Amino acid sequence: MFRNISEGRTVYFIDKWQDGMVRIKNRYIAVQIVPYTPTQTLRLNDHSLAKCLLQNVEKYYGVYGLGIIEHGFRVKYCNERTKIAIIRCLHRGQRFVSSMLPLITLIGDVRAKFRTLYIGATIIQCNKFIIKHQKQFLDRVMGQVESAKERQDLFKRVMELDMDR
């Protein structure tokens, strides 16, 4: 029997068979979504990406896999411009999610594949990696943009990290 106790941002569960509390551990998976044809635009948002991932977990691992990852599963960040997303799942379901990502070939109606960039235990470390990765992306793309205003707009769109979901 478990009972939920919240202390700040960390959630603990009291287990009546064990002494003490058990901390819930999350894993954060940073992925890049790569369409097979670069001209195709992906209409990415958190909800559609989460729905696609949950459907594929159920397809490959059945109800058991879906039950393992459903609690605590969430798409925390999704950038349509750079096609990068951060997926949060519980520690015990991380291997289900990470092993299923290469098997996905269709997101919505667009053929695409997932590239796992980083798996970390904290959102802060995942954010640091994403910022570093997006700066590298900007270095490659900035040379192709001519005007200063377009560069500024591109920088704003790429470097936004809206995690308030």
Image (cartoon, rainbow, N blue to C red):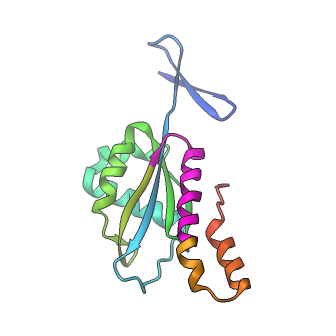
Vertical position of residue 103 compared to residue 10: above or below: below
- For the view shown, which residue lies furthest in the top direction? 19
What's the residue at 38%, 78% (across, down)?
Answer: 110
Vertical position of residue 153 compared to residue 45: above or below: below
Q: Residue 10 occupies which quadrant of the picture?
A: top right
Residue 91 in view in this figure: yes
Task: Residue 36: give x, y in percent of width and height.
Answer: 34, 78
Q: Residue 152 occupies which quadrant of the picture?
A: bottom right
Quadrant occupied by the C terminus: bottom right
Residue 80 in view in this figure: no
Q: Is residue 54 magenta?
A: no
- For the view shown, which residue lies furthest in the right direction? 149
What's the residue at 30%, 51% (across, down)?
Answer: 99
Of 22 and 86, nearer the camera is: 86
- For the view shown, which residue lies furthest in the bottom direction? 146
Q: Which residues are magenta?
A: 119-138
Task: Residue 148: give x, y in percent of width and height.
Answer: 72, 84
